[in-house]
Amino acid sequence: MKYSTQAVAKPYFIFAMILFVGQVLFGVILGAQYIIGDFLFPEIPFNVARMVHTNLLIVWLLFGFMGATYYMIPEECQTELHSPKLAWIQFWVFAAAGVLTILGYLLLPYARLAELTGNALWPTMGREFLEQPTITKLGIVVVCLVFLYNIGMTMLKGRKTVVNIVLFTGLVGLAVFFLFAFYNPKSLVMDKYFWWWVVHLWVEGVWELILGAILAFVLIKTTGVDREVIEKWLYLIIAMALIGGILGTGHHYFFIGAPEYWLWIGSVFSAIEPLPFFMMMVFAFSMVNRRRREHPNKAAVTWALGCTVMAFLGAGVWGFLHTLAPVNYYTHGTQLTAAHGHLAFYGAYVMIVLCIISYAWPIMQGREANSPRAQSMEVLSCWVMSIAMLLITFLLTAAGVVQIWLQRLPESGQALSYMATQDALMTIYWMRLISGIAFGVGVFMYLYSFVVAIRTKDQAPLLQAETR
């Protein structure tokens, strides 16, 4: 580890992994509740389990992004972090707010939680993915401001690179677009219109900049390819991501009461959105093939390459499958959406956070890579998680196709009701639950690989020579 303040990333990575385990656990609970409707009821109703599952996803990824940033920025800027103390305060505030919010979901009726947190004074609750109480949202804003101040001051006194500029731009966008979570108009159309400015412009806009920056950093360190080559690719990728991502928001405006021109804008720019993910995949494999050194951390390289492939499939291919307006007319709100969401989040964001942890954690422990035995288990965990997630995606896709066939396509008036259609999908849901459990096994293997690293002695020593 070149700079002592990079160690600030450790608690962020640890807490991210704890929340990741919680997210997967509630995902399995949800899979069981699809089959056994009263499973864990009334202690954990379906709506509460879903809130916890999706909120944990968002929060643990944010912890992962922050940890990655605190590790990368000192090295990219070639200077110590502006204020490690501020980073620690930010961590405890964010962790406390996250834990209290999740406990609020689990221990209180949602209406009671809204009442106790003063939602009547500034109503922002009750919307998908933005269920957090207003005071929690305000806490997130404060955490983001402190985070951006700390990173910004570090960058001002240090070296400016394409990687840290792109990363900081993505983080600023993350903070800015979250502010639309506070805008809650009475019109349902206006509410949905701006709700997507948080949800879509996060995951299909500025988060892609964060993904690109982290991927570029790992490839620079593990391949030895000239920084200038990787940075040119990064510029091209983020340009395409922003061109497609911003106006691609229109594919959410098809059937919410927005003007008709969004049918064309959303469809055309949705066709562009897979391109940056395809370019990212070509870029990663090209850089690894042109590598000028054999880095001992094979696991981190595996995660980096796997991330680009799965992101292209999940965000690119499965995203495009149902974003053209004539197709989306039948598919929106079906299990096809869930199929796309699961694979896209896993491929683009879960895998890149696991990648940077895989790369940075051994270095923060004083070695360049974990032992070959530990890395073998970690690579195997990558395959187990990826295959399990592909199975979940294929099964949810099949469920979506059957759902459309039984519930939406018949024009004779004989279409099945929603619940009757769900009954027809039970076999698929059982298979999906088994796949979800297999994914959990993969997560356990990933975490256990770090235990194996501690126990094994044949570890790669930390090299002192800096890679460009």
Image: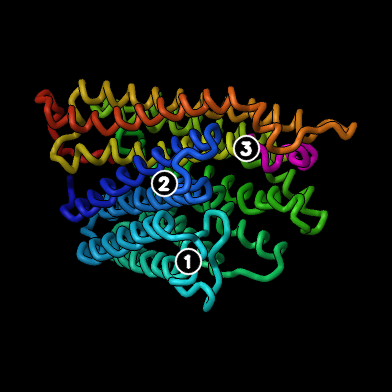
Could you tell me how far apart the alpha carbons at marks 1 and 3 are, in whole angstroms? Answer: 37 Å
The magenta stretch spans residue 325:
yes
The amino acid marked with disc number 2 is: Ala
Instruction: Provide the residue designation for mark 3.
Output: 319
- Residue at image coords 43%, 48%: 43
Q: Amino acid at mark 1?
A: Arg
Q: Nearer the viewer, mark 2 or mark 1?
A: 1
Kindly identify which residue carries mark 1: 112
- Magenta span main SS: helix
Q: Which residues are magenta?
A: 324-335
Residue on which the image places disc 2: 213
Which of the 4 quarters of the picture holds residue 187?
A: bottom right
Q: Secondary structure at mark 2?
A: helix
Q: Is disc 2 in contact with disc 1, using a CB cutoff of under 8 Å? A: no
Question: Can you tell which of label 1 and label 3 is closer to the viewer?
Answer: 1
How many residues crowd around disc 2 within 10 Å: few (fewer than 14), some, or many (20 or more)? Answer: many
Q: Secondary structure at mark 1?
A: helix
Secondary element under disc 3, as helix, strand or loop, is helix
> What's the colour scheme?
rainbow
- What residue is shown at x 41% (from left), y 57% (from top)? 168
Q: CB under 8 Å between callouts 1 and 3?
A: no
Location of the N terminus (image quadrant): top left
